[in-house]
Amino acid sequence: MLNQLILIGRLTHDPETKKLDDGRKVSEVVLAVQRSYKNMDGNYDTDFIKISLWEGLATAVENYCKKGVMIAVKARVQTYKLELDDEKKINMLEVIGERVTFLSSSGKHENVTETKVQ
């Protein structure tokens, strides 16, 4: 079985890493991914995909990326149930980044090319 997703796009904002109560680090970034085909108006649509990056990946992306930088993310899709109230439960999808490749430089460190989850 395979649960793998490859996304290439640009960050819509500067990454910010949060430290959770249990000490783990997480960064939620939004990647603007342009579709490979034109819509009825002759324009390319763009999808904005939220990706969760954990621990080392969160730190690396915060240190080496900023808004507009192009990255490639190898990720997996994860599901969870969200309880809105006693009667309503909905299934949610979450994209979890497992590996990041930096495709354009942020200007801080041009020799950094990729990192992955440890």
Image (cartoon, helix red, strand yellow):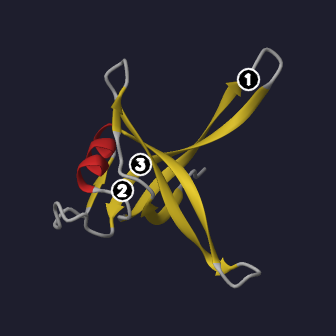
Where does the image place residue 21, in percent across and percent down from the top left? Answer: 37, 18
Q: Residue at x 29, y 47 (%)?
A: 62
* The C terminus sits in image quarter: top left
- Toward the bottom, the furthest residue is 42
- Looking at the picture, which amino acid does disc 3 mark? Glu
Q: Which of disc 2 and disc 1 is earlier in sequence? A: 1
- Looking at the picture, which amino acid does disc 1 mark? Leu
Pointer 1 and pointer 2: residues touching (CB < 8 Å)?
no
- Determine which residue is flagged by label 1: 84
- Looking at the picture, which amino acid does disc 2 mark? Val
Q: Residue at x 35, y 51 (%)?
A: 14
Q: Comparing marks 3 and 1, which lies closer to the viewer?
A: 1
Helix, strand or loop at disc 3?
strand
Residue 118 visible (yes or no): no
- Compared to residue 85, the image places residue 112 above or below, namely below
- Disc number placed over residue 100 in the picture, else none: 2
Name the residue nearer the viewer: 91 or 35. 35
- Disc number placed over residue 98 in the picture, else none: 3
